[in-house]
Image (tube, rainbow, N blue to C red):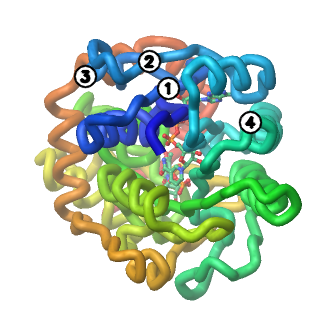
Amino acid sequence: MKNLLVTGGAGFIGSNFARYMLQKYPQYQIVVFDLLTYAGNLDNLRAVADDARYTFVQGDICDAAAVRAALRKYRIDTIVNFAAESHVDRSILDADAFLRTNVMGTFTLLQAAKELGLERYHQISTDEVYGWVDKPAVEDDPLIPRSPYAASKASGDLMVNAYYVTHGVPTTITRGSNTIGPYQYPEKVVPLFVTNALENKPLPLYGDGKQVRDWLYVTDHCEAVDVVLHHGKIGEAYNVGGENERENVEVVKMILDTLDKAPDLVRRVADRSGHDRRYALDLTKMRALGWQPRHSFEQALTETIRWYENNAWWWQKIKSGEYREYYEKQYGERLRTSEAVTV
Ligand code: NAD
Ligand code: TYD
């Protein structure tokens, strides 16, 4: 493995992964292949822009010809697919792009991996494919996705497995939990709440705020993908969690405390439709590969908050753009009908 195509590498986790791999493996070439949707941002890759081992190609993973051209031109042996529509709330407003990229895009990459005989196709998936769980999910549990986003990601996983079983494509999958860290687009709850708090704007908490997510620091997520690429078993899926289950109210509280902001910034707003109460992962299989998360919840959240405090240039640029339209659509009415809440 030497020449990696990192699809979706201009997004949050993909750009962290590109930087991580360039730093760790001096002999690797990293080609980031990204459409630059609203979530893609070349600022995320500024730190490696002058590295001769890094190349950026703007392209769509649904474009079979563009994918093949990049694979051939850069003699790619491994695809790591981060490219996706990734936000549940947007999938509730309109799921079209989710099916296109997360299902058809995955299919297009798998077909190219098969035809060109790649050494590995790795799919970045999510704990949301298991749906709302009562106990930590194991990899063989049924996939019972409940949002259009999760359903599109589960479809991608099923297609990956089909290409392994039917066509012998050497695949692996990682199913990560809620990831936080630098360069996360401020639509997901942590960067949204941190940047809103920094601007003294309201924090829109959905419903009773007692939903549970398992929080994972982004470098731990990247390290797990690296471990699976090098030591994972072909045809298998691996859960990647932070072992940091927290209710949303606890997350909000810690953000406010760390930034020394008043609790009255929090507003209770209309809940997300179909809101999953809990995601949780059993990590036995990843632990058997020698990996475990290094960051506690407190470390992960504090490092993330500090990054947003110190990099206002990055998120202020985003928040002043087309983001405003999305924000109004998603939160305008909700905030107008919101109520105060004590966390
Ligand atoms: P992101 O939204 O920050 O980035 C997605 C990237 O994909 C963007 O750069 C975008 O331009 C690119 N992209 C979208 N459509 C494309 C297309 N058709 N062709 C090429 N590029 C395209 O997402 P993220 O949070 O970094 O998530 C990356 C992956 O990890 C996704 O597959 C997501 O499902 C998965 N995941 C995310 C989390 C999380 O907490 N963020 C947790 C588990 C799994
Ligand atoms: P999110 O970051 O969208 O991740 P996901 O839904 O994919 O896990 O949301 C994390 C949790 O925070 C989830 O329970 C929904 C909640 N949430 C809010 O309460 N308010 C918000 O504005 C957002 C975006 C999320």
Mark 2 → mark 4, Cα distance in angstroms:
20 Å
State the image coordinates of residue 233 (x, y, percent, origin top left). 57, 70
Disc 3: CA contacts within 10 A as few (<14), some (14-19) or many (>=20): few
Report the front residue among 251 and 15: 15
Query: Looking at the picture, which amino acid does disc 2 mark?
Result: Thr
User: First in sequence: mark 3 or mark 2?
Assistant: 3
> Which residue has dot 3 on it?
47
Q: Earlier in the sequence, mark 3 or mark 4?
A: 3
Vertical relation: 191 (above or below) 178: above
Judging by the rendered image, the residue that carries numbered circle 4 is: 116
Where is residue 249 drawn, in percent x and y? 37, 64
Q: Is mark 4 within 8 Å of ligand 1?
A: no
What is the distance, in whole Å, between disc 3 and disc 4 at their CAs? 31 Å
Looking at the picture, tell me which residue is in the foreground, 288 or 150: 288
Q: Earlier in the sequence, mark 1 or mark 3?
A: 1
Q: Please state which of the two labelled residues, at mark 1 or mark 4, is closer to the viewer.
A: 4
Crowding at dot 1, Cα within 10 Å, few <14 / some 14-19 / many 20+, comes out as many
In the image, which disc is placed on residue 32? 1
The quadrant of the picture occupied by the C terminus is bottom left
Q: Is residue 325 visible?
A: yes
* Secondary structure of residue under mark 3: helix
Looking at the image, which residue is at 51% across and 19% down?
324
Q: Quadrant of residue 42?
A: top left
Instruction: Name the residue carrying label 2.
Output: 55
Marks 1 and 4, the one that precedes in the sequence? 1
Residue placed most toward the observer, 282 or 91 = 282
Amino acid tagged 1: Val
